[in-house]
Image (cartoon, rainbow, N blue to C red):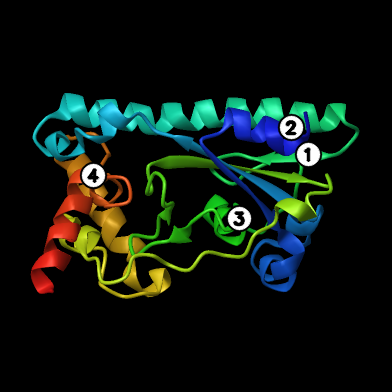
């Protein structure tokens, strides 16, 4: 079994990014070490669907909010365990592997800032960065936790082109955001305001609630069948 067959067995979504393709930009942002190895294996791990589906109730129920917050962190730990298995497999085949965890950190590299796993997933053609600034896939929307493994394993045959945004005219996350942190713009660097997002979450904390939101993750039609149906009906009515 080759490495990518093993990766596919363990992950819900996966891909390979050729970091040398965007080498100059990546080094400018993160430093030389980010391109120590040419390839990045990207692993997407699904969050618990039952918990995600209850997110709208979390604004009135702190127990549900806490359940979502716990799942957010627990999914990180599950994804990291998967990455460790894959990294060990790579090393058994006499190649190098460095895990960048869900926070984009590692003690093995000297990075200017923590790495964005969304960046490697986007470069790998696994999905696109939506208006909500979340890496979104056609299969599961943004309901995934991401981990990256840098490696010198030859993986050129698995490299794909970056995926263009599939958000289109959809404004569901824009309208649903309780912190007014998302605008209907195509460029996620302009559409998403991290300050407003953070301010809203902190305001919830100041009111004594768990530090959790997740509405944009919940509402995205690529992960939410009810939202997808709403958009489908809207398009039919416009014809």
N-term mark: 4 or 3: 3
The residues bearing labels 1 and 2 have C-alpha atoms spaced at a distance of 5 Å
Q: Residue at x 11, y 73 (%)?
A: 238
Circle nearer the N terminus (3, 1)? 1
Pointer 4 or 2: first along the chain = 2
- Dot 1, crowdedness within 10 Å: few (<14), some or many (≥20)? many
102 relative to 227 in the view: left or right: right
Indicate left or right for 218 with 104 as reference.
Answer: left
Mark identifier at residue 120: 3
Q: Residue at x 74, y 40 (%)?
A: 98
**The residue tagged with tag 2: helix, strand or loop?**
helix
Locate residue 128, reporting x and y percent.
46, 61
Residue 228 image offset from top left, x and y in percent: 23, 52
Question: What separation in Å lies between label 4 and label 3 (alpha carbons)?
Answer: 27 Å
- Please indicate, yes or no, whether residue 179 appears anywhere in the rendered image: no
**Residue at figure coordinates x 18%, y 59% from the top left:** 231
> Would you name the residue on which mark 4 appears?
225
Identified at 60% across, 53% down, the residue is 115
Q: Residue reaching furthest right?
A: 94
Q: CA distance from mark 4 to mark 2?
A: 35 Å
Q: Which residue is mark 2?
A: 87
Of the residues under marks 2 and 3, which one precedes in the sequence?
Answer: 2
Q: Position of residue 155 (x, y in %)?
A: 78, 49
SS for callout 3: helix
Q: How many numbered dots are placed on residues in this image?
A: 4
Give the structural element (helix, strand or loop) at label 1. strand
**Mark 4 touches mark 3? (CB < 8 Å):** no
Label 1 and label 4: CA atoms lie apart by 37 Å
* Mark 2 surroundings within 10 Å by alpha-carbon count, few (fewer than 14), some (14 through 19), many (20 or more): many
């Amino acid at each position: 079994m080759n490495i990518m067959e093993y990766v596919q067995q363990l992950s819900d979504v996966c891909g390979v990014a050729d970091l040398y393709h965007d080498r100059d930009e990546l080094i400018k942002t993160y430093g030389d070490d980010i391109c120590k190895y040419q390839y990045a294996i990207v692993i997407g791990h699904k969050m618990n669907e039952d918990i995600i589906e209850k997110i709208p109730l979390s604004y009135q129920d702190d127990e549900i909010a806490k359940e979502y917050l716990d799942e957010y962190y627990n999914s990180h730990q599950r994804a990291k365990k998967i990455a460790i298995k894959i990294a060990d497999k790579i090393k058994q085949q006499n190649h190098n592997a460095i895990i960048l965890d869900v926070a984009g950190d590692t003690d093995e590299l000297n990075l200017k800032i923590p790495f964005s796993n969304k960046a490697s997933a986007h470069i790998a053609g696994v999905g696109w960065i939506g208006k909500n600034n979340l890496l979104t896939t056609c299969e599961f929307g943004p309901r995934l936790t991401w981990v990256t493994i840098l490696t010198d394993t030859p993986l050129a045959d698995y490299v794909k082109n970056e995926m263009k945004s599939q958000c289109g005219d959809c404004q569901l996350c824009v309208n649903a955001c309780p912190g007014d942190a998302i605008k209907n713009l195509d460029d996620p660097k302009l559409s998403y305001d991290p300050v407003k997002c953070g301010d809203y979450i902190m305001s919830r904390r100041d009111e004594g609630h768990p530090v959790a939101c997740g509405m944009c993750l919940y509402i995205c039609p690529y992960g939410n069948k009810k939202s997808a149906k709403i958009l489908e009906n809207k398009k039919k009515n416009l014809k």
